[in-house]
Amino acid sequence: SIEDSSTSNIQITQEEEEKSKKINIFFSNVFSSNYYRISLILILGQFLSLMITATGVCSQYLANDNIDIPTSQSCFNYVLLTLYCLVMIKRGEFLSVLRQNWWKYLLIAFADVEANFLVVYAYQYTSLTSVMLLDSFTIPCVMFLSYFLLKARYSWLQFLGVTVCLAGLVVLAVSDATQNTYSESNPLLGDALCLCGAVLYGVSNVGQELSLKTFGDTFQYLGFIGLFGSLISAIQMVILERQKLAEITWTWPIVGYMLGFAFSMFALYSLTPIMMKWSSATLYNLSILTSDFFSLVFSVYLFQHKPSLLFIVSFVLTVTGLVVYNVRRRDKCFEAQSETAPLQ
C-alpha cells in the first residue's frame, strides 16, 4: 500500500508539472503574441484619451471663469518636459544632439505650441464637445503627411476604419448641435480655431513619429520639445498675455485648473512617444477619439448635460471603426519594425 501511495503521489506530481508547463506555455504565447501588444496599445490609448479629456475639462472651467491665457496654460507643461534634458546632459550628448537636430525640434515644437494655443483659445468661443471633435480632422492630416513623409501605405480596411470613425464623429456633432446645450459666443470662430489646431497637431504628431523612428530616443524628443516649447511659449506670453496675466485675480480653483491642465499634458506628452514607438501616429489619433465620449460623460456630471440616442450611435460607430482599423496593422514600411520592436 505504501508503494501504491508513493506511485500515485508521483503521478499526481507529474500531472501537476505537466499542467504547470502547459499554463506557462499558454501565458508565454499570450504575452508574446500580437494580441497582447494590441491590447496594451489600446489600453494606453484610452489612458491618453482620459488625459486629453482632463485638459479639456480644466480648459472649460478656466474659460467659464473668463481666464483667457492659452499660451500660459501650456507653458508649465513645456517647462516640466525640459527636465528630460537632464538625461541627455548626464549621458554627455546634449550639445552634440543640439547642434545636429536643433532646427528639426524647433519646427516640431513651434507646430505643437501653436496647436495648443489655438485649441485652448477655442474654448473661449465654443463648447468642450466641439473642441474635442478636432481629433477627427487630425486623422486625415496625419494620414496625408505620413503617406509622403513616412512612406506609409494603408489598406482598404484601414481607410474603412477611419471612415467609420469619422462617421461616428459626424453623428456626435449632429447630436451636439441638435441638443444645443451650450450658449457659445462665436461657434464658427471656435470651430475654425479647432480646425487650424488640428492641422498643426497633425504636423506635430507626424514629426514626433518621424523623430522617434529615426533617432529612437524618447528622452531626446521630450527634452528638446520641452526646451524649445518653453522658449517659444515664454516669448509668446510676453507679447500676447503679459497684460492679461497681471489682471487675473488668482484663486485656488484657478490655480488648481492650471496645474491640472499642466500635469495632464505632461502625462500625455510623456506617454505618447511610447504609443508612437509601439504603433503609429494614425493609430494614436484613432485611439484618442474616445476622448469625445469621455468629455460628454464628464459633461453629464460636471455640467449636467444628458446624452442622446445619437450619442450612443456615434459611440458604436467609433468603436467599430477602431476594431476595423486594428484588423490590419498599418504602413508597410514600418510593419516589420512594429512587430519586432520591444515594448519599452
Image: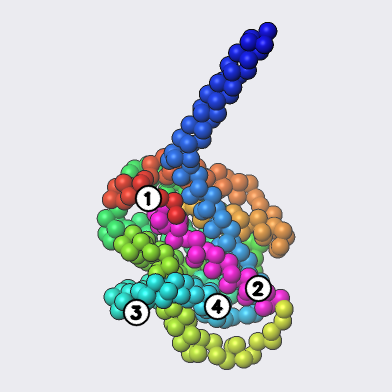
Q: Earlier in the sequence, mark 4 or mark 3?
A: 4
The residue located at (50%, 48%) in the rendering is 40
Q: Amino acid at mark 4?
A: Phe
Res. 92 in view: yes
User: Which structural element holds mark 3?
Assistant: helix
Mark-to-mark CA distance, 3 and 2: 36 Å
Which segment is the magenta one?
253-281
Mark-to-mark CA distance, 4 and 3: 24 Å
Q: Nearer the viewer, mark 1 or mark 3?
A: 3
Mark-to-mark CA distance, 1 and 3: 28 Å
Q: Earlier in the sequence, mark 3 or mark 2?
A: 3
Residue tagged 1: 341
Q: Amino acid at mark 1?
A: Ala
Residue 273 is covered by the magenta coloring: yes
Find residue 257 and name its label.
2
Find residue 76 and name its label.
4
Q: Position of residue 2 (x, y in %)?
A: 67, 11
Q: Nearer the viewer, mark 3 or mark 2?
A: 3
